Amino acid sequence: MRFHFDIIKLWELPTAVLFQKHLKGILPLAPITQEGARREVVDEAIKALLKDDPENQNKDLLSLLYGISSLVFDDQADKQWLDWRFRMLEDLLNDSWAFRELRQRGEEIGLAKGREEGRIEGILESLRLLVQRLFPSLLALLEDFPQKSFTAKELNAILLQVVAAQTEEEARQYLLTALQQHL
């Protein structure tokens, strides 16, 4: 068995050549052709993918076009235009498996981050209550804790140290050390 293939350097290929092929499957690559990093090219690719597609079979190609386009646009105005242009297609793209997958991953990351932030807030509240009960004069030290980027694991360790502290001075040292490590 033999395979014959050519290497195509898309960044050297004139954009017009890609459009002349009339192959919808390669249109998402238009932004990485020679003159491809332009709004007009992306818009032309969108229109070509939407043309004669009443059953929206090209929605995955549109998703791919959006992803590739987002990699080539550096200018903030171009990024905003790209976002606006694809928002106009949002209903169509929402049916794309690629967008559903990306959205699901984003939601999972957001939920995990929210859970972690909730754990941190809970531990901080426990630490405040503990310090208020055992060493009320140290409450002022805790004011800076929410602004620091402590992990839940670090805060739990601090909480355990304060619980184990025999004296107010020992608890103060634990809290000060924790704050200094997060400067």
Image (spheres, rainbow, N blue to C red):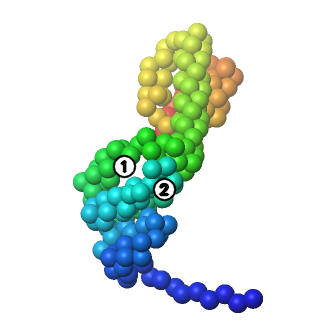
Q: Which residue is mark 1?
A: 86
Label 2 secondary element: loop
- Among the 4 quarters of the image, the one containing residue 74: bottom left
Taking the image as shown, residue 92 lies to the left or right of residue 36, namely right
Q: Work out which quarter of the rendered image holds the C terminus and state it.
A: top left
| Residue 151 versus residue 170 in the image, above or below | below
- The label on residue 8 is none
Residue depicted at 56% across the width and 25% down the height: 118
Q: Which residue is mark 2?
A: 58
Residue depicted at 38% across the width and 57% down the height: 51
Label 1 secondary element: helix
Q: How many marks?
A: 2
Percent position (x, y) of residue 121?
A: 54, 24
Percent position (x, y) of residue 23?
A: 46, 71
Mark 2: amino acid: Asn
Taking the image as shown, residue 143 lies to the left or right of residue 134, namely left
Mark 1: amino acid: Phe
Residue depicted at 48% across the width and 17% down the height: 139
Q: Work out which quarter of the rendered image holds the N terminus and state it.
A: bottom right
Bin the neighbour count of mark 1 within 10 Å (Cα to Cα): few under 14, some 14-19, many 20 and up.
some
Q: For the residues marked 1 and 2, what is the alpha-carbon distance in whole angstroms?
A: 14 Å
Residue 76 visible in the displayed image: no
Which residue is at the front of the view, 147 or 66?
66
Pick whichever of labels 1 and 2 is earlier in the sequence: 2
Q: Residue furthest top?
A: 133
